[in-house]
Image (cartoon, rainbow, N blue to C red):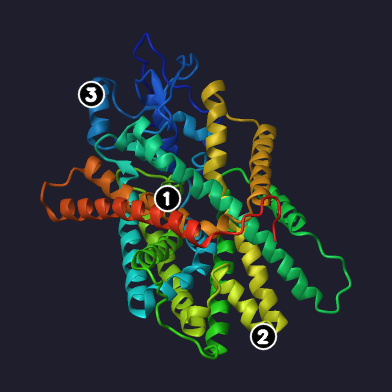
Amino acid sequence: MSETGSDEITPVPMTTGLPTPPTEDPPASMSREASVAWVQPLLIPASTATTGGGDQITQKTPKTLTPKSRTPRFMTPIGSPVRRAFHLTRLDPQDAWLPITESRNGNAYYAAFHTLCSGIGIQSLVLPVAFPYLGWTWGVICMTLAFIWQLYTLYLLVHLHESPETGIRYCRYIQLCNATFGEKLSKFLALFPILYLSGGTCVALIVLGGATSKSFFQIVCGATCTAKPLTPAEWYLVFTCAAVILSQLPNLNSIAGVSLVGAITAIGYCTIIWVVSVDKGRLPHVSYDPLKSNKNFIHFFDILNALGMIAFAFRGHNLILEIQATMPSNEKHPSRVPMWRGVQISYTLIAMCLFPLAIGGYWAYGQMIPHQGGMFAALYGFHMRDTSRLVLGLASLFVVINALCSFQIYGMPMFDEMESQYTRRFKKAAPWWLRAIMRAMYTYGCYFIAVAIPFLGSIVGLLGGISLPVTLAYPCFMWLKIKKPKKYSLSWWVNWVLGVVGILLSIMLIAAGIYVIIDTGITVSFFKPQ
């Protein structure tokens, strides 16, 4: 049953108020289903609207607003039970003011663009670094199992996005954590990994984009170039300024074209790097024997650190619910259908990029693969002289463009969180000038951290262990808590086993990452980017 029409309903007098609606009308281009979702929060007789962080917004009933309905007047008393029976989705009115959810006209193609752009990136370049510790057999097995595991948890998140039982859409990962673990526990378990996967990735993208911009300039300029090059910090600043300009795009749907460009360039540089590496053949005296330490426990930690690198490569789950939130949804056409279709398309292409890159890179370089920079460093270190400048320059340009595009999608959850603080307090959307200032401040804040701590990429194994539960463990526990599968059924066993193993693996990876850093050391250079 639909809740929009020409007949008026006399609002039921209440001592408490309805949530204040968005101050703007639904866009003319919005579909009928999305328009229903737009006005539907106005029909919920609730005095408060709960935000993602658990805060409540108390607002007065608007005097001039009269909801309309096609439901006959004599059916009005049973309207609410009927609506629950048909599982119509309830939305928070505040969502219409925030960048992730203010536009809900997404589709499977937009989802594929966003997922592909966030799923391939700097993490793919370090995959071959894990193989010298695992060897051929275990390297391929562990990478395949990790890919299947994270694809399964993606499936769980897509189907947990909206609850038919309660009619609630969980538009952000932290909201689903709050509903599952409680607000206090979710802040302890998930807040830091989610913040790192957004903010930390933005910092790493500035480091990668700035350093690669410097390499691109050197390739284009040539060996006889007399132009004075910029310093690394200045190249970081050039990249950051470009990121600030792109960050002014208003919402997640508006950057679909940016994500498409990022996806194309990611596929491009991954293909260029592994094709060139395989085409040039194996390096002389290459060895595939797994690296082993004299002490067994050190070798065990090295293996765990390698697993952390693989776990770090398969990330992006913290963005899945946000991407799905940009789609319209109703009981006949739930958002999980186009979202899962987009995920299938994108992860097919991701597998076609990551597996050849890891296997081809290890075949070409073996134990000689550089631990800092991975495949990109190997391309320049081993094939700078025997590869055309056009190919090297194109690969560098693709990396810069992809980093610039990926920055937007990883930064969007942080933009959303900053603006939500304003909307909770002032009960209205942030003005355009304040939105521009907040996004510029965040981006330049990431630049400051990138210049101050340029060695962040050296602890990739440790960071992979910290963020692993978000990808491999928490979705399993969320499914058990919300869906409540039958005890001792196959679904019950699978999710319990994967969830517990994921938590234990995360703990071991964190311990291994800390030990490897202490044992091998890292080059700490505060405010000295290379």
Question: Which of the two marks, 3 or 2, is nearer to us in this view?
Answer: 2
Q: In which quarter of the image is the N terminus?
A: top left
What distance separates the C-alpha of mark 3 from that of mark 2? 73 Å
Residue in front for this viewpoint, 91 or 358: 358
Judged from this view, the residue extending furthest toward the top is 15
Could you tell whether 281 is left or right of 36 in the image?
A: right
Circle 1: is it few (<14), some (14-19), or many (20+) Cα within 10 Å? many
The quarter of the displayed image where residue 356 is located: bottom left
The quarter of the displayed image where residue 141 is located: bottom left
Residue type highlighted by circle 1? Ile
Element type where label 3 sits in the image: helix
In the rendered structure, are the residues bearing label 1 and label 3 in contact, judged by CB atoms less than 8 Å apart?
Answer: no
Question: Which of the two marks, 1 or 2, is nearer to us in this view?
Answer: 1
Q: Position of residue 493 (x, y in %)?
A: 16, 53
Identity of the residue drawn at 42% across and 33% down: 52
Q: On screen, 486 above or below 494? A: above
Q: Where is residue 250 in the image (x, y as percent from the top left)?
A: 61, 43
Identity of the residue drawn at 52% across and 89% down: 282
Q: Quadrant of the C terminus?
A: bottom right
What residue is shown with label 2?
387
In the rendered structure, are the residues bearing label 1 and label 2 in contact, judged by CB atoms less than 8 Å apart?
Answer: no
What residue is shown with label 3?
78
Q: Quick check: can you spot residue 377? A: yes
Residue in front for this viewpoint, 241 or 23: 241
Which badge, 3 or 2, is on the more N-terminal residue? 3
Judged from this view, the residue extending furthest toward the left is 488
Circle 3: is it few (<14), some (14-19), or many (20+) Cα within 10 Å? few
Residue type highlighted by circle 3? Ile
Question: Which of the two marks, 1 or 3, is nearer to us in this view?
Answer: 1
What distance separates the C-alpha of mark 1 from that of mark 2? 38 Å
Q: Which mark is residue 466?
A: 1
Identity of the residue drawn at 48% across and 13% down: 63
